[in-house]
Image (cartoon, grey):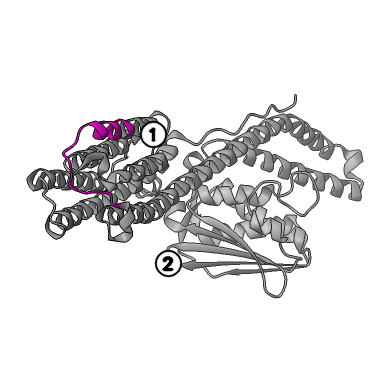
Amino acid sequence: MPLQTEPAAPPPPAKAQLADASAGLRNLHQLIQLRWIAVVGQLLTIEATHYTLGMQLPLQSMLAIVGGMAVFNLACLVRWRARKPVHELELFFGLLVDVAALTAQLYLSGGISNPFVFLYLLQIAVGAMLLRGGYIGSIVVVASVCVALLAQHSIPLPLAPNLHLGLASPYVMGLLVCFLLNAILVVIFITRINHNLRRRDARLAAVRQRAAEEEHIVRMGLLASGAAHELGTPLATLAVILGDWKHMPALMRDASLKEDIAEMEAQVKRCKSIVSGILLSAGETRGEHSSQTTVRAFLDSLVQEWRTTRSVDTFLYDNLVDPGTTMVADTTLAQMVTNVLDNARDASPHWVHLEASLDADTLRIVVTDRGPGFAPEVLTHIGVPYQSTKGRPGGGLGLFLSMNVARTLGGSLTAENREFGGAQVTITLSLPDIALPPTEKNERHGP
């Protein structure tokens, strides 16, 4: 029956919410910084207008608004330091407060005749970057209503446009300052906010890619376990037939036939072991079928089995790990190292080198070959399924599965081409992640 493929699953809700929360916190911090600039700028503008230009302003009311903005910003700072997820509604409310404060200040200082009325455009630009859907539309509507109200209601400001005076006109100078503020703040803060949003989108894309890879692994696991179940019956039948042949005198008298039967029994036994390993990996392998051993013993056993079942002209093996270092050995871990060794042998049938070393609590397994190395396009997308130069269906799955197993075990897998030819694959594992928990050790070994 053909396999029905499904579209890649969306990112897990928890991880997607984490990416949104991180971007929300950074954007809230940008608003806090912008509001501090607004507080300082309003204080400087009030001082210049009232004392330098000699225009009478309602200082108490305007300073009270500035003080209210400062208090509100301190509350936002406390909220930001709590490091809790920031909802879009909170950013919307913060922008509404900024629009209200700007409207109140403009009402007390000339309304629409004040050159700083164009600061509404800054609020709308910031809202367009931070908000989506109805929120940004609401900001535009609110700002437009505020401008319309200021055109009808405001305390007059004795400031004549005098546009013909050019830069000598206070109104023209105010327009110039407002333009510079808008331009500078838009460039700085919109760039920062856009960078935050790009980082969020990149994290979401990585989460989606991870979800797609995990879904691919599950699908392959289902196919493998199904195939293993199907292969179990014919392998058992072959084992019974070979057992019967061993008890047939006519066959046993032929030395060469007897040797062939023994070899067939060994190969059937190996196939059954592989099938059992596949079925074992489909379950809770580490929790139910793991065994405690040492790193040296685990690698020695794995290398010995690999040597007896694969042909390679020269295989160098250096185990530099302390004999007393313990770990938990399971099928998935062994299969990961075996996949890397198989890839190295396929690329370099004449020479393969495996070296294991320990750096503090980090186990490092390095597999080196003298083959042609990785193609640039494969090296760029290392670990992506079906990225292979072997030219056969299913190529590239070995490193893909190995990389995901290493990641599941809290480690990593990296690949690179050697300077003088060949390739090198490094598996890095954290010993605490592949060791038995203290409670489990006590259960296995007793007091």
Q: Which mark is residue 136?
A: 1
Q: Amino acid at mark 2?
A: Ala
Q: Is residue 316 magenta?
A: no
Foreground of the two, 98 or 324: 98
Residue 322 visible (yes or no): no
Foreground of the two, 349 or 158: 158
**Range of residues picked out in magenta:** 144-162
Query: What residue is rendered at 60% in x and 65% in y?
Result: 366
Residue 296 visible (yes or no): yes
Query: What residue is rendered at 28% in x and 48% in y?
Result: 115
In the drawing, does residue 435 fall left or right of residue 314?
left
Q: Position of residue 437 (x, y in %)?
A: 38, 49
Secondary structure type for disc 1:
helix
Q: Residues within 10 Å of mark 2 (few under 14, many from 20)?
A: few
Foreground of the two, 275 or 445: 275
Secondary structure type for disc 2:
loop
In the drawing, does residue 167 fall left or right of residue 428?
left
Q: Position of residue 418 (x, y in %)?
A: 67, 71
Q: Earlier in the sequence, mark 1 or mark 2?
A: 1
Q: Position of residue 446 (x, y in %)?
A: 35, 47
Q: Is residue 153 magenta?
A: yes
Q: What is the C-alpha distance between the residues marked 1 and 2?
A: 53 Å
Q: Which mark is residue 155?
A: none
Q: Amino acid at mark 1?
A: Ile
Q: Quadrant of the N terminus?
A: top right
* Residue for badge 2: 360
In the drawing, does residue 97 fall left or right of residue 1?
left
Q: Residues within 10 Å of mark 1 (few under 14, many from 20)?
A: some
